[in-house]
Image (cartoon, rainbow, N blue to C red):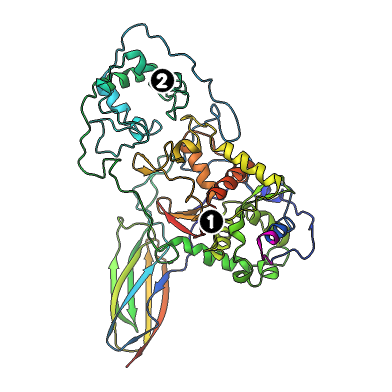
Amino acid sequence: MQPMKGPIAVLRRLSVAAFAVAGACGMVTDSNGAERVKTSAPIAIEGDASPRPWTRYPGWTTRNFSGFNSLASTASPPVALQPRKLDGPIVGDPAIGRQLVADRRRGGSCLACHIMGTAGNADLPGNVGPDLSEIGNAGRDDEWLFNYVFDPRVYNPETIMPPWGTHGVFNDSEIGHIVAFLKTLKEPARFASALDDPRKRPTPEEKRDNLDPLVNPGMWAVEKAQELWKTPGPNGSSCVSCHANPEAELKTWAASMPYWEPRLHKVLGVEEFVTRHAKATTGQVFLMQSDENTALAVYLRYLANGTPIHLDQTSAEAREAYSRGMALTTRKIGQLNVSCADCHSPDKGGLKWVRGQWLGQLRGQLDHFPTWRTSQQSVWDIRKRFQWCNVAIGADDLPPDAKEYGDLEFYLAAQNDGLKLNVPGIRH
Amino acid sequence: MDMAEQPRIKLPGQARKGEIIEIKTLVSHAMENGLRRDQNGVTIPRKIINRFVCEFNGQLVFSCDLDTAVAANPYLQFFAKVEEDGTFRFSWTDDDGSTLTAEEKIIVTA
């Protein structure tokens, strides 16, 4: 169940825009035509498409990450430039270190990315970073080990490892315990089963029939949307008034989304388009990530299932959105100081395991959204997935209609060019 | 988003006399098991579907009690032998006493 976010007052701020071009409703034919229709379809220009101030979902961490970069702001502590000099040898307790490296409350901790010999070796270590099971034989001194945990950028500016000390995840004495534990690691890890060894764990593959309503509860969104389609809004009209035959008319539309919207100077995805178009036409207010908005967003993509994703990038503005989106994927954010590419690019952490979770690459991450999440028992749109990702790495989430998410979705969609829509998906 | 309230039933619209048919049912329910706590540490009260019944023309076909270990959105699949035209009636009973029902007809050929 999604909580209703924000007061009704927010809804009122969405005022109806001018109807830019008469008779622009519906009728999407070819890709050029689609672009023309999109940028002339009536949309509400004023106001936000989600509540302000945006409040994080209940049940997600309540920690404030404003001291770190987000996709919209720069706030992280300065990068350490030099290794810290230690006064003497590290005094630490390997037993405490052993617990700290497996502490899931600390950003997933070390085991999220490293195999570490006997430490929690039945507890799904990841393999984004090197196997540290024999680091105790590597001849590294205390100062090197301490600094590599405190802020590895002093040795390797390109690293994707979080600066645990500089970003305050572990304090000096905790890092001391971790170093003491690292020095005890001198034997290859032994695993009870192949599932425990991230190098042998089989790659997850989604094979369920996601369009069978008995398999995928997300399909219920389609039914809900079909009802909404014919429900009149405050203006007395409904979706049907202009789109009487959505199966034929909108057979490809969603596969060309998101798009650059010159009237708003931002990228609009299906979800924000639904909010603004419904407001301007039927008068309904379907804020992004409301049940109604998500149902319609599922339905609109469902209608275009089987159509290859393909964006119109002919305009200079669209190409600029693409470039901004690409830049965002390499932006280091959050307390863990990682970028999208750090986890999802195959030359970095992509196609590897972080703990028991597989890090997919960007291609293949959009064609099934919005998707039913079995672990959440609800349908999430791609923007909510962005928000969840942000919070998971210790970065403040943005409102779903943030322009940064628009640029990111644009770039992501371009990486998924040619993949056929298959919505609603079903995933963990 | 959450799901609709309408249960899902899948069974063939027609069958031969004496045929054993497969019936699939799915219903939207949180199946709150009464063991979880909210953010203030207060226990979230139990609210589950505790009983499912399937009848055919008034005769019991299949029933079961569900308990707290059953996951959200209970999915049940079972078989029935059909000898005559008729109506399957399904009911799911909630802890709060309310009942969700659904019906499906089947035509039996010789």
Q: Please name whichever residue, A135 or A266, is drawn nearer the observer in this view of the structure.
A: A135
- Vertical comparison of A44 with A52: above or below: below
* The C terminus of chain B: image quadrant: bottom left
Q: Please name whichever residue, A160 or A122, is drawn nearer the observer in this view of the structure.
A: A160
Residue A105: image location, x then y, percent: 38, 33
Quarter assignment of residue A175 = top left
Determine crowd level at label 2: few under 14, some 14-19, many 20+ residues with C-alpha closer than 10 A.
many
Residue plotted at (43% across, 19% down) = A155
Q: Amino acid at mark 1?
A: Gly
Looking at this view, name the residue that lies furthest to the bottom: B110
Quarter assignment of residue A139 = top left
Residue A176: image location, x then y, percent: 33, 17
Tell me whether circle 2 and circle 1 mark residues in contact (CB < 8 Å): no
Quarter assignment of residue B95 = bottom left
Determine crowd level at label 1: few under 14, some 14-19, many 20+ residues with C-alpha closer than 10 A.
some
**Over which residues does the magenta segment extend?**
A27-33
B74 is within the stretch colored magenta: no
Q: Which comes before the other along the chain, label 2 or label 1?
A: 2
Q: Chain of mark 1?
A: A
A30 is within the stretch colored magenta: yes
Q: Chain of mark 2?
A: A
Residue A266 can be seen, yes or no: no
Q: Amino acid at mark 2?
A: Phe
Q: Please name whichever residue, A125 or B51, is drawn nearer the observer in this view of the structure.
A: A125
Q: Which residue is mark 1?
A: A418
Q: Which residue is mark 2?
A: A150
Residue plotted at (53% across, 41% down) = A56
